[in-house]
Amino acid sequence: MKVVWSRGHATVRDVYEDMLEDRKIAYTTVMTMMNVLEKKGHLKKKAEGRSFLYRPTRPQRQVVGSMVREFVGRVFGGAAGPLLAHLVDEEHLTAAELDALAKRIKEKR
C-alpha cells in the first residue's frame, strides 16, 4: 500500500521491485497481497496493456485505521491495551515515541 500511495498508482512489478530493495520477496506473494487488498476494497485495478495498474481507493490514514482495527480485533480480541503493552515491553518504541504516546494518553483523559 505504501508504494501505491507514494506513487499514486503502481503495477505489481513496481511494488515488487520497490519491496525487493528491502527484503527478499516472491513476485507471486506481492501479486497475491495486491489482489487481497483489491478484494477488500483498498485498491482498484485497471488493465494497462498486459498488466494491471492499481490505485488506492481511500486515503492512507483511513485504510491504516481500518487495518489496525481489524488486526486488534483478530489478534487481541478488540482490546488495544495488550497491543500497546506488547510494543512497550518489547522495546519497539523509542524514548521520543514513548513520550509522545504518554502525552496523547494524558490528552485523552
Image: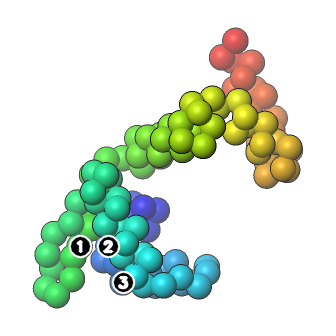
| Residue at 52%, 78% in the rendered image | 19
Q: Considering only order in the chain, which callout, 1 or 3, is on the residue closer to the N terminus?
A: 3
Marks 3 and 2 in Cβ contact (< 8 Å): no
Check contact, mark 3 vs mark 1: CB within 8 A: no
Res. 7 image quadrant: bottom left
Disc on the earlier residue, 1 or 2? 2
Q: What residue is disc 2 on? A: 10
Q: Is residue 6 visible?
A: no
- Look at label 3 and name its amino acid: Arg
Which secondary structure lies at badge 3? helix
Between 5 and 37, the residue placed more toward the observer is: 37
Within the image, what quadrant is residue 103 found in?
A: top right
Residue type, numbered disc 2: Ala
Q: Which residue is mark 1?
A: 53
Q: Is residue 31 left or right of residue 46?
A: right
Residue shown at the point (36%, 47%) measured from the top left: 59
Which label number is shown at residue 9? none
Residue extending furthest toward the top: 109
Label 1 Cα crowd, 10 Å radius (few <14 / some 14-19 / many 20+): some
Q: CA distance from mark 3 to mark 1?
A: 10 Å
Which amino acid, by three-letter code, is at mark 1? Leu
Quarter of the picture holding the N terminus: bottom left
Q: Is residue 109 above or below residue 44?
A: above
- Image quarter where the C terminus lies is top right
Q: Which residue is mark 3?
A: 13
Residue 85 in percent (x, y) is at 78, 36
Check whether the beta carbons of the residues at disc 1 and disc 2 lie within 8 A of each other. Answer: yes
Mark 2 residue crowding within 10 angstroms, few (<14) / some (14–19) / many (20+)? many
Q: Position of residue 81 (x, y in %)?
A: 71, 30
